[in-house]
Image (cartoon, helix red, strand yellow):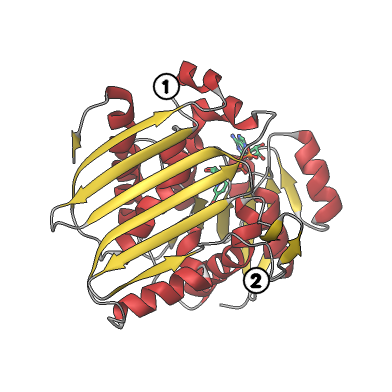
Amino acid sequence: MSELNIGIVGLGRLGRRHALNLRDRIRGARLVAACSPVDEELDWAAEHLPGVHRHHTLEAMLAEPDVQAVFLVTPTALHAGQIIACLHTGKHVFCEKPLALNVEDCQKVEAVATAYPQLKAMVGFVRRFDASYQDAAEKLQQGLVGQPYLLRSQTCDLNDENGFFVKFAPSSGGIFMDCSIHDIDLARWLLGSPKPLRVWATGTNALHPALADCGDVDNGVAMLEFADGKLACFYASRTQAHGHETLTEIFATAGRLTVGANPRANRVDISDVHGVRNECVQDFYQRFAEAFVSEAQHFVDAVRHDQPLALSLADATEATRIGLAITQALRSKQVVAL
Ligand code: NAI
């Protein structure tokens, strides 16, 4: 296949980033269409994506025969239906995480994807494409630190005093589905995809009590036990003072690997009357900008050269299943079996 013609759906916070990457940085990709129901977002596309066809609906975009693959960067509740629509019209599809907010929808997507084996469908678990996480995965493969038995991982966002995410919370599935879903996928990937057994979770609202109205918290912790005895502990937060901190530790029989122990923005250390310190990354995109490029490149290469994808829809379904169990544990204060 020569260049892959791509249409993007959703031009919000992350969709614009994907669009600019597809425009400028992904080899073998040609962004030919963009879709959003919001006029201002299509105006943005007219300015920043010249020559790209603009559509108000996914259906209109899918009717374009030129579009061979679709990037879905839309609200999570829409993912499953939109992936299915893309597959039924013969388009390869990349969709942002999570796959869906319930297991039934995930399974529907898997069933439809099975009916179209010639089409690629991938959910974006971006950390699998981050150079540091890939290095850690390789070191585990090589047995550098022995057998891993415990993964402790956190996704912690800078506090947003405007509370934007409070409005977004009801449609996000809650803090564990929105943030810890990445850590859940990491645990499965780095611990060798063991079968999950049970979870427990709790949380607190340190700064944003309004989250309680939708059963959510601004700080949550969860424990996951696997059938083979391996363990995972997750921490998710919306209230950090210093920046965005994604940190993962993998404890193993002959050592430990740590990814992201200091969320430094660069290699500058400041020594002054306050001591020695460094500036921190402020959001997930600053931390994972290069990984988003590698992820999109992987998808485009897999489609163009008919290569296998690094992760399956079943991986995405399993992450949703575990994330939902953790959310249920948070709300019920009970251990939930998987
Ligand atoms: P956003 O709210 O900023 O953007 C959503 C976009 O979808 C908007 O452009 C909106 O107009 C569009 N949209 C809404 N309804 C639509 C419809 N019916 N048809 C077509 N477009 C429609 O949201 P954001 O933050 O960009 O998140 C989008 C997705 O990306 C979510 O699923 C989220 O979980 C995921 N995400 C993933 C991250 C990661 O680390 N991989 C980080 C942030 C978000």
- In the rendered structure, which disc, 1 or 2, sits on the residue that comes first in sequence? 2
Q: Position of residue 3 (x, y in %)?
A: 63, 74
Name the disc covering residue 215, or none: 1
Q: Quadrant of the C terminus?
A: top left
Give the Cα separation between the discs numbered 1 and 2.
Answer: 40 Å
| Residue shown at the point (38%, 62%) measured from the top left | 249
| Residue shown at the point (70%, 29%) measured from the top left | 162
Q: Quadrant of ligand 1?
A: top right
Residue furthest front in the image: 273
Q: Which quadrant would residue 144 be assigned to in this image? A: bottom left
Q: Position of residue 296 (x, y in %)?
A: 57, 65
Residue 218 in view in this figure: yes
Does 247 appear above or below 212?
Answer: below
Name the disc covering residue 26, or none: 2
Q: Position of residue 239 (x, y in %)?
A: 57, 37
| Residue shown at the point (14%, 56%) measured from the top left | 229
Q: Amino acid at mark 1?
A: Gly
The number of callouts visible is 2
Q: Work out whether residue 51 or residue 66 is closer to the camera in this orientation and state it.
A: 51
Does 106 appear above or below 94?
Answer: above
Residue furthest right in the image: 47
Q: Position of residue 106 (x, y in %)?
A: 34, 43
